[in-house]
Image (tube, rainbow, N blue to C red):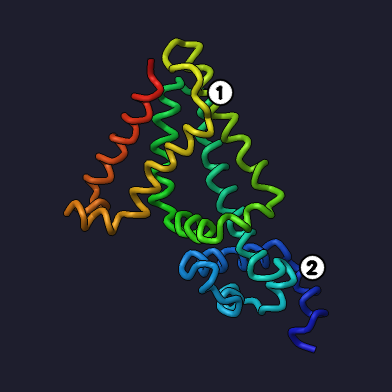
Amino acid sequence: MKGGTGSLRTGAKRDPEKNRERILAAALEEFARYGLGGARVDRIAAHAGANKRMLYYYYGNKEDLFLAVLESRYAHIRRAELGLRLGALDPAEGIRRLVAFTWNYYLKHPEFLTLLNSENLHRGRHLRRSRQIAAIHSPLVAMLRDLLERGVRQGAFRKGVDPVQLYISIAGLGYFYLSNRHTLSTIFERDLLAARSKSKRLKHMTALVLGYLMK
């Protein structure tokens, strides 16, 4: 029977990885556009060139698929951060590079911010079920801790900075600005997404972070 479980299993054996990737990409677009509540499994399946049965076969229900999308996006940004090779840089330059990377990542991947907004509306309940999220983030904490410790040993950075608190501050400086760009642009009568505004914001964020860290 066409579209039945048998044909699904045959298709899965042919190229399961590509099937999963197509579904995940379609789900990312859907969740980023509509949020978890407004997303529809039938639209995701249609955009992936699959059927709902295949989607359920690979990812379970809609909430499981949402978690898979979240995990994939967190893994994406964490891999990109590791690619900066901050351990080979002077500590202050490493911090500058991380601030710039985080800012530019948010600009290039607005869907990431939308997904975070959606998950926070649900009080993080999906991430709490993740078996991967802690392992995904541990290299980031280790990388930041190394930068901070090297900066202290060189006499450049202050002692006692928590790497997790530091990262939350770096992320928050860009996240709040972009998540509230429409209201802030109206309130202060300036285009916060103009090229000059974005450049000034990056300089401001970098100066704030380094000003806190430097002795």
For the residue labelled by badge 2, is the local secondary structure a helix, a strand or a loop? helix
Residue 116: where, in percent of width, then height?
Answer: 50, 55
Dot 1 amino acid type: Asp
**The residue positioned farthest toward the front in the image shown:** 123
Q: Which residue is mark 2?
A: 13
Whether tag 2 and tag 1 are in contact, CB under 8 A, the answer is no
**The residue positioned farthest toward the left in the image shown:** 189
Question: Which one is in front in this view, the residue at disc 2 or the one at disc 1?
Answer: 1
Q: Which residue is mark 1?
A: 146
Q: In the image, is residue 144 above or below residue 116?
A: above
Residue appearing at x 43%, y 28% in the figure: 95
Residue 162: where, in percent of width, then height?
Answer: 52, 27
Q: Dot 2: few (<14), some (14–19), or many (≥20) neighbours within 10 Å?
A: few
For the residue labelled by badge 1, is the local secondary structure a helix, a strand or a loop? helix
Residue 144: where, in percent of width, then height?
Answer: 53, 29
Dot 2 amino acid type: Lys
Closest to the observer: 73 or 48? 73
Is residue 81 found left or right of 135 in the rendered image? left
Is residue 93 found left or right of 200 in the rendered image? right
Q: In the image, is residue 172 above or below residue 124?
A: above
Q: Earlier in the sequence, mark 2 or mark 1?
A: 2
Residue appearing at x 34%, y 32% in the figure: 206
Q: Dot 1: few (<14), some (14–19), or many (≥20) neighbours within 10 Å?
A: some
Q: In the image, is residue 107 above or below residue 49?
A: above
Closest to the observer: 187 or 196? 187
Split into 4 quadrants, where in the image is the C terminus? top left
Of the numbered discs in the image, which one, if any, rests on residue 10? Answer: none
Residue appearing at x 43%, y 47% in the figure: 105
Q: CA distance from mark 2 to mark 1?
A: 44 Å
Closest to the observer: 59 or 180? 180
Split into 4 quadrants, where in the image is the N terminus? bottom right
